[in-house]
Amino acid sequence: MNDDRYSTADRAAFVFVHGAWHGAATWDLVVDELAARGHAAIAIDLPGAGANAAVPDSFHRRPLDLDAFATEPSPNAAVTQEERTAEVIDAVRRAATVGNGDVVLVGHSLGGVTVSEVAETIPDELRAVVYLAAFYLVEGAVTVGEAMAGGHVPEMFLADPAAVGALRLDPLSDDPAYVAQLRAFFYADLDDATFESARRTLHCDEPAALGGSASTLTPERFGTIDRHYIRCADDLAITAEGQDLMVQRSDAALGSTTTVHRMATSHSPFWSDPAGLADILVSIAAS
């Protein structure tokens, strides 16, 4: 789904890029908060995600056959980073027409990889780039393993990514232990009803080939953009320590500074504190 239901002529617009297993609906509450503050926003479903996500046949059969689910190839496996980058560039250019021409690009979690590629490609078309508990991986500065140290999401994979071509979860699981993991790692600060709403927006297969590879980001292009990182202190998917490491190493590699903002939330403040997140984003747009 593409969301540009709000437009305004005199303020910066936002483009939102969701993380792994998520989609455009992730941002609905934040889009509403920004609209109340006079800002347009566009959230898209990336190729292979949200409304564009294909799922293995075995996912629909309940109770889940874990053996079948662990071996069926992913229909999402062929999605490329180039496709995702192109979709977000299109959204940035559309966002420039619904505000004052300034665009703030925001990426969550794995969406940080796409945000980085877009920012390196079209730096002159962005007012600022924002990483929300996101992968911020400059080639040669920090590895995925270092960034994920202490994180627990891989414990939830129900298939070998190399065998099926996807990072595979079961967001509809009825296994209490598995559901508790999902909640702890992504949505630890949500009440029961909001958690149930959140997890039912997820898809099961994130293309494995897009799993957090480092980007070739140059000081001459990416390094010229106003960069911000929103640190989520209670995150168990990408820990606060991993977030700090990515910022420190990336800044050292680029020779410039990323502004860090702090939220006392788990991995998904767009659900747990959309007003607080919107306040930070508006302050970035005005800076």
Image (tube, rainbow, N blue to C red):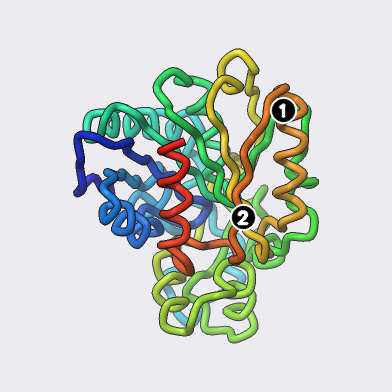
Between the residue at mark 2 and the residue at mark 1, the CA separation in whole angstroms equals 25 Å
Q: Residue at x 56, y 16 (%)?
A: 221
- Which mark, by number, is residue 218? none
At label 2, which amino acid type do we have?
Arg
Instruction: Give the side of residue 249 with respect to residue 50, left or right.
Output: right
Q: Position of residue 46 (x, y in %)?
A: 40, 43
Label located before the other in sequence (2 or 1): 1
At label 1, which amino acid type do we have?
Glu
* 104 relative to 69, above or below: above
* 20 relative to 195, above or below: above
Mark 1 Cα within 10 Å, few/some/many (few <14, many 20+)?
Answer: some
What residue does disc 2 label? 262
Q: Residue at x 64, y 83 (%)?
A: 177
The answer to whether residue 164 shows anywhere in this view is no
Q: Quadrant of residue 7?
A: top left
SS for dot 2: strand
What residue does disc 1 label? 139
The one nearer the camera, 204 or 237, is 237
Q: Residue at x 80, y 46 (%)?
A: 146
Residue at the extreme top: 220
